[in-house]
Image (spheres, rainbow, N blue to C red):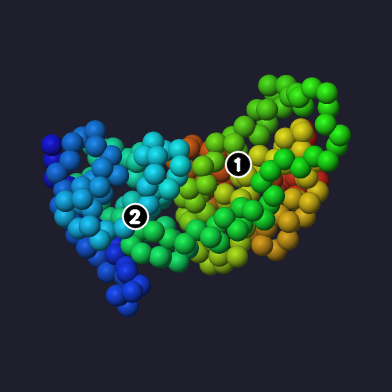
Amino acid sequence: MKTVTLKIQRFDPEKDQRPHWAVYRVDVEENDRLLDALHKIKWEQDGSLTFRRSCGHGVCGSDAMSVNGINRLACKLLMGRLPDKIIIMPLLAFRVIKDLVVDLEPFFAQYEKIKPYLVNDESPPLTERLQTPEQHARYEEGTKCILCACCTSSCPVTWGDPAWVGPAAIVNAHRFLFDSRDRGAPERLAILGDRLGVFRCRTVFNCTGCCPRGIPVTDLIEQVKRAALYGDTTGE
């Protein structure tokens, strides 16, 4: 058992003119997660503290927040691996609804823009559209995205221009651009090739560094850049 100090940025638009800090001290076990510490605060100290959480196992991506300056999932951070003083803020680049809850509607609007679904108007075959292991491996990394918004919120380009499509949308475009069954590449590449598309990326690597699923986000973005330049999604 150890005692940690959590400094959390609070903001309630119904009462506050600007964000402020609240400090809490919590007793935790080494194997507790940061999400457990937040629960203790909400259930035992301050019921007004507001944050998102759902599955608690790093799958839904709902409890994304800035932890000591890096976007993380609270459910994946063990307290034994964190310092005794922890600073928590909401994800940058998004409007704060309350405390650690941000408005992700613009994020999902960018995701929807790149048509994140299989496009194929060909007549259905008599059997499944089969792929080789190599064909599947070509886009497998992109399928790991859980849309937590950690990468997009960590991107300096997003901070300066929220209208930019963002890393998460590009990763999900990659998933379909390099799928041998998909026929929507020309339309997606046209979307990604405009001034708010993939070439706004400055290769800072913040996105790769904070991805809770270990996706090589920057590498996938570079692959999409090459596809947009040369119109080639074969990966050869």
Q: Residues within 10 Å of mark 2 (few under 14, many from 20)?
A: some
Q: Which residue is mark 1?
A: 219
| Lower sequence index among marks 2 and 1 | 2
Q: Residue furthest right?
A: 123
* Closer to the camera in the image, 118 or 68: 118
Query: Which label sits on residue 124?
Result: none
- How many numbered marks does the figure carry? 2
Disc 2 marks which amino acid?
Phe
- Please tell me which residue is depicted at 34% across the width and 45% down the height of the picture: 74
- Please tell me which residue is depicted at 33% across the width and 74% down the height of the picture: 14
The N terminus is located in which quarter? top left
Q: State whether residue 234 appears in this view.
A: yes
Above or below 67: residue 122: above
- Please tell me which residue is depicted at 78% across the width and 45% down the height of the picture: 184
Indicate left or right for 162 with 112 as reference.
left
Disc 1 marks which amino acid?
Asp
Q: Position of residue 158 (x, y in %)?
A: 54, 61
The C terminus is located in which quarter? top right
* Closer to the camera in the image, 27 or 52: 52
Find numbered disc 2 in the image and state the secondary structure of the residue it sits on.
loop
Q: Position of residue 197 (x, y in %)?
A: 67, 58
Above or below 49: residue 54: above
Above or below 180: residue 130: above
Q: Mark 2 or 1, which is nearer the eye?
A: 2
Question: Quarter of the image holding residue 176?
Answer: top right
Indicate left or right for 148 with 116 as reference.
left
Q: Residue furthest bottom?
A: 17
Q: State whether residue 202 appears in this view.
A: no
Q: Which residue is mark 2?
A: 51
Q: Residues within 10 Å of mark 1 (few under 14, many from 20)?
A: some
- Please tell me which residue is depicted at 14% across the width and 44% down the height of the picture: 27
